[in-house]
Image (tube, rainbow, N blue to C red):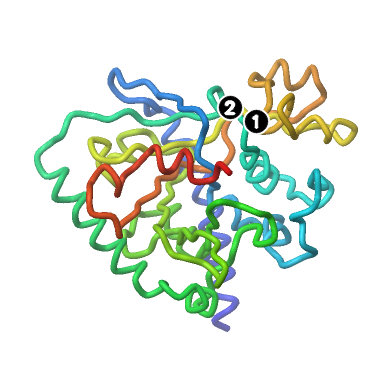
Amino acid sequence: MSRRILAVALLTLFALLPLRAQDQKSQPDVPNSDQPAQISPAEVSHDATAQASATSHDATRDGPNMSNMPMPDMKGMNQDGSAHAMLSMSDRKMDMGPHMKMTTLRDLKPGDQEKADQIVTAARKAAEKYVDYKVALADGYRIFLPNWPQKQYHFTNYRYAFEAAIQFNPDHPTSLLYEKTSEGYKLIGVMYTAPKNSNWNDLDQRIPLSIAEWHAHINLCMPPPDKRGEAWGQNAKFGLAGSITTKDACEAAGGKFMPQIFGWMVHVYPFEQKPEDIWSVERQANHHMD
């Protein structure tokens, strides 16, 4: 009976989310005079909400070791592009300029610093429980693409991902961030997410934009089956490392264009001591570069 109730609740949730998106379309994506900044190279990340789809589930399962593969097989990728996007962004020489947008820092308002400090405290408390990565796995966290070499691995709690799509809870970060070590994984931080249709005022309500810089990955052109090889390498045309950045160019090349892949996300490194290290955009940008 409890499973039936949960299923009905989830169906209701998915039915309501599109309505919320329609309501927000009337709100400016970039309030006031703020414009999204772009950085390069970009931080390798993913939206846990996108991962929570059924198709993404297959991409997170343990499979054959892919570390020696020169090129991932696109046939195994999920249709929403999340797994492909994750691998695209792992290219060490990629230039993500037109494929990323970021919020810009706003002026500090009264209460912003106190709110940010409370979030860091909550993030640290939530993360401390999972210093041992085995505890995270036992508690239901799942590693995104565990067999693909990455500088930073996301251990995602899909229940918290659904929660983040509705409301912000600093005690429940969507993902835990780990670095691979010879003995397993070392915990370094957490990731919070927000729906892709969130405007900047929405993000500011979650974590003040005077403190944190949220980012989103944009302008993804998924390659057609006969051009999968053009989604990788220095001269890639497709993917989040590709030269194609517009819908017209993507359709002309036979690809599938996605204006934004994943939702908004922000990394927090709560074990650091300095504010610039706790909210480091540079560390987010470079953490996945070999």
Callout 1: SS: loop
Q: Residue furthest front?
A: 182
Is residue 61 in view from this perspective? Answer: yes
- Residue 246 place in picture, x, y as percent: 65, 19
Residue 256's place in the image compared with 55, above or below, is above
Task: Please identify the quadrant where the C terminus is shown.
Answer: top right
Callout 2: SS: loop
Q: CA distance from mark 1 to mark 2?
A: 6 Å
Between discs 1 and 2, the one toward the N terminus: 2
Residue shown at 34% from the left, 40% from the top: 203
- Residue 237 place in picture, x, y as percent: 74, 24
Residue shown at 27% from the left, 63% from the top: 122
Residue 20 in the figure: left or right of residue 6:
left
Residue shown at 63% from the left, 42% from the top: 90
The amino acid at mark 2 is: Asp
The amino acid at mark 1 is: Ala
- Look at mark 2 in the image and give the residue it sits on: 95
